[in-house]
Amino acid sequence: MTAPEADPAGAAALPTVPLVVAAVQAEPAPGELSGNARVAADLARRAAAAGARVAVLPELFLPAYHPPTLAADPAGTDVVADHAGLVTDPRLDPLRAAARDGGVTVVVGAAVRHPDRRRTIAVLVVDRAGTVTAAYHKQQLWSGERELFSPGDRGATLVVDGWRLGLGVCYDGCFPEHGRAAAADGAHGYLCPSGYLAGSEHRRDLYYAARALDNTMYVVFANAVGGPPPWRFNGGAAVYDPQGRPLVRGADTGADVLVTTCDPGVLAETRAAHTMLADRLPDQGARRTTLTG
């Protein structure tokens, strides 16, 4: 057996096989968790039928990103995680079945209630055995989210077929440090369920391409689409290559499942040619000189 190629960025190893991924954009119904789980299952099946091994759906897709509903009906919109992060809610059974039947790992946004009563914006990972885990909790809360949710306190990395995939949610990806922390943990890719509102297209298209280029890693960006004003979302789901170029991108309207391949050879070539991760200084810019002009 050939040993995995060393990562030029300094991580233990690069993946040895391609990984087919799907970035999903779709419109959930506010507060309809059971129905949205069925829609998510259908989208996951579409992704699996196209060969995807990982399918990424938008932020808070299961309850829908609709703050008035999230505030009014936490019992109906939340799923409950135990101390180990496991979620056994039967409303997610269609999603479990889709992951098992399609051999696809599903990454989807949810509102999660914890044993200590904290409430977080979470990434649920539904593995190929159908186990559902609240794997990551959004660290950078945006605007009114702070009135409804508590921030997460740690990053997370998902490993699929030898690919290390950092997890983030929407506003997390606006902070270069968040993507860099994933890369420093050896991430080859960065999965970002998101909810970008209409009017934010420029920032939506810039942030995640920049995170890919900053860290020479693939980025899978999923986004909601449609919805009742003022909570109308703008699609544009995409997968970016390690130089920040879109391999696939959705329109600003309409549901879509965008499937492409993350290539370990491209990752290796990019990191060999563009060595920002290997060259970064441990304490860049902390000591500064001030000049007067």
Image: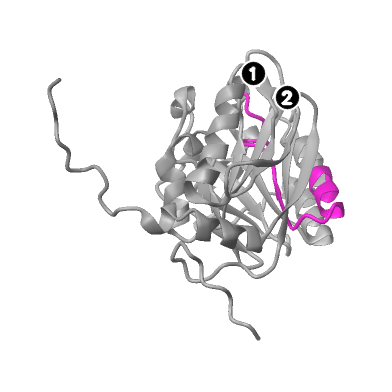
Q: Quadrant of the C terminus?
A: top left
Q: Residue furthest bottom?
A: 1
Quick check: marks 1 and 2 in contact, CB under 8 Å?
A: yes
1 or 2: tag closer to the N-terminus: 1
Q: Which residue is mark 2?
A: 252
The reply to whether residue 174 is visible in this rendering is yes
Q: Nearer the viewer, residue 231 or 196?
A: 196
Identify the coloring. one colour
Say which mark, if any, is on residue 198: 1
Q: Amino acid at mark 2?
A: Asp
* Residue 44, horizontal then vertical, whole percent: 79, 48
Kindly identify the residue that appears in the image at 55 percent across and 45 percent down: 212
Quarter of the image with the N terminus is bottom right
Nearer-the-camera pick, 171 or 71 = 171
Span shown in magenta: 42-66
| In magenta stretch: residue 48 | yes
Q: Secondary structure at mark 1?
A: loop
Front-lying residue, 202 or 173: 202
The amino acid beneath tag 1 is Ala
Q: Is residue 7 above or below residue 126?
A: below
